[in-house]
Image (cartoon, grey):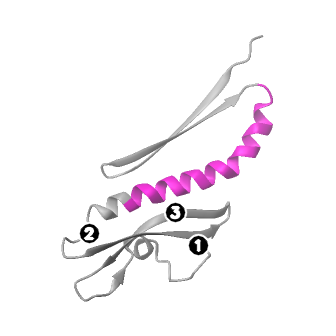
Amino acid sequence: MTEQAVEIIIQVKCGDVSKEITEELSTVDMLSQMQKITRGLEQMMTTTALEVVEASLHSQVPKSWKNLGTAKRVVLSESGPIGFRRHIYEDQDKQRRKPLDEFLNIEPYERNS
């Protein structure tokens, strides 16, 4: 019997923004491979979902806000640390705003979700 592969495709979509994750597994010892990548896939899916939401929020920011760039953020989840980048803005009142953090209701320096 020839070796075949199983392809797992996950699409994450928020509004007009979408991203796709593709993983390929060998059918030989597939169950143990699935267990090994499950945690990684959970982290990848969460990171991808956050990237999609961040892109969607970035496109909706008021024109009066000044873009100060991006910064990395890491939160801990049940599947392990989740790292992502999010935009930082200065609003019309000169307050620093991080729309993704506000959307997720994450306080500054908070590490657990």
Q: Please state the extent of the stretch shown in magenta in the rendering.
A: 28-54
* Residue type highlighted by circle 1: Ser
Residue 70 x, y percent position in the rendering: 42, 68
Q: Is residue 19 magenta?
A: no
- Mark 3 vs mark 1, foreground winner is 3
- Tell me the residue that label 3 is attached to: 84
Identify the residue shown where x is 47% and y is 60%.
50
Residue 72 x, y percent position in the rendering: 51, 68
Q: Secondary structure at mark 2?
A: loop
Measured in 3D between alpha carbons, the distance from the residue under mark 3 to the one under mark 1, in whole angstroms, is 14 Å
Left or right relative to 66: residue 84? right
Q: Are marks 3 and 1 in contact (CB under 8 Å)?
A: no
The tag on residue 61 is 2
Identify the residue shown where x is 73% and y is 17%.
3
Q: Earlier in the sequence, mark 3 or mark 2?
A: 2
Identify the residue shown where x is 73% and y is 25%.
27
- Tell me the residue that label 1 is attached to: 113
* Residue type highlighted by circle 3: Phe
